[in-house]
Amino acid sequence: MIRQLLKWTIGALSLLALLLLGPLAVIAVGEVDLDGHWSTASRESTHQAPDPRVEHQAVIHVYGARAFKWRGAFGIHTWIATKRRGADQYTVHQVLGWRAYRGGRAVSSFPTASPDFRWFNAFPELLAERRGPGVDALIDRIEAAVARYPYSRQYRVWPGPNSNTFTAYIAREVPELVLDLPPNALGKDFLPSGSLLARAPSGTGYQLSVLGLLGLTLAWEEGIELNFLGLSAGLDLNDLGLRLPGIGRLPLLDRAPRPQPTRPAVIPAAWPAATAR
């Protein structure tokens, strides 16, 4: 019995050490700024979002950028930007930990003309985009999901609920986004209300998760992904790439960036929502 327990312990520690190589590599190559101060960090626009004064169609963008300081070695911060047809501004929806720590609402929704801002120096990646007919209806559903997010006054960096828990929740509620959150969106696997089974954030498969600490995702967009103590690794099947903790997606083939559909996607009937608790 003791020998078996020792064997499992050594195996778990070995797996954890292997997964931690990803965040250590991010620090080693200088991907995170460990010395900067938030008050002087850049929040300027990266000019990825269309100018709302020029683009009259409805738009949805989802962005992700490395978290500030050491947290950026492990994960990213994500947010959702929406613009209705004819609107001259976007609305950014995100979760901010400092607001919850001060006794306020962690969920923040605010208007801006530039939703593609740097996240305290970190350049954001456009994770999903929808434009055109039918997008206003998706925005209605996003706003309704934001309003019923169950952790609006709670925040925990690890294993969640955090900003990625929020974005993943919205994506599951609006699967037409087909949002494939990268493996370093730490907190995305923290399921509401202690659920063990849920639809994957992309809506193209399912995931098992125990409090965001241990789980498995099988989906067309996410591929095969294992979560151990919040660190995720796996294989991206449709884009043929590795999914690595801290690092994110690592393509195995030299391919152009993922095309982002400009119209609402239709989720096949074979992928119904999971309701298990």
Image (spheres, helix red, strand yellow):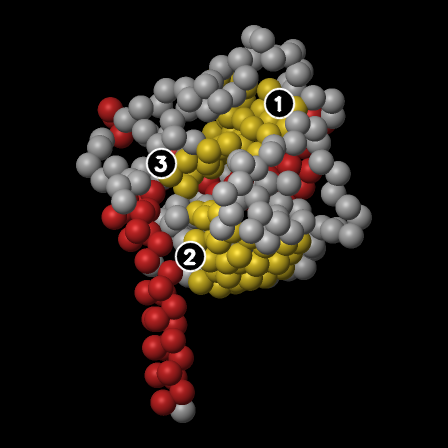
Residue 48: x and y, percent?
Answer: 49, 22
Q: Which sits in the foreground, 67 or 122?
A: 122
Q: Which sits earlier in the primary sequence, circle 2 or circle 3? A: 3
**Residue 183 point in image, percent of width and height:** 47, 50
User: What residue appears at the point 65 percent right and 51 percent down from the top-left corner?
Assistant: 220
Compared to residue 44, the image places residue 183 above or below, namely below
Please tell me the numbered disc located at residue 98. 3
- The quarter holding residue 42 reads top left
- For label 2, the residue is 231
Residue 175 visible to an observer of this rendering:
yes
Q: Amino acid at mark 3?
A: Trp
Going from the N terminus, do you reach mark 1 or mark 2 first?
Answer: 1
Residue contact between numbered discs 3 and 1, judged by CB atoms under 8 Å:
no
Quadrant where the C terminus is found in the figure: bottom right
Above or below for 257 versus 202: above
Element assignment for label 3: helix
**N-terminal label among 3 and 1:** 1
Q: Nearer the viewer, mark 2 or mark 3?
A: 2
The amino acid type found where label 1 is placed reads: Val
Look at mark 1 in the image and give the residue it sits on: 59
How far separated are the C-alphas under marks 3 and 1? Answer: 28 Å
Q: Quick check: marks 2 and 3 in contact, CB under 8 Å?
A: no
- SS label for mark 2: strand
- Residue drawn at x 22%, y 33% is 36
Q: Quadrant of residue 15?
A: bottom left
The kind of residue on which mark 2 rests is Leu
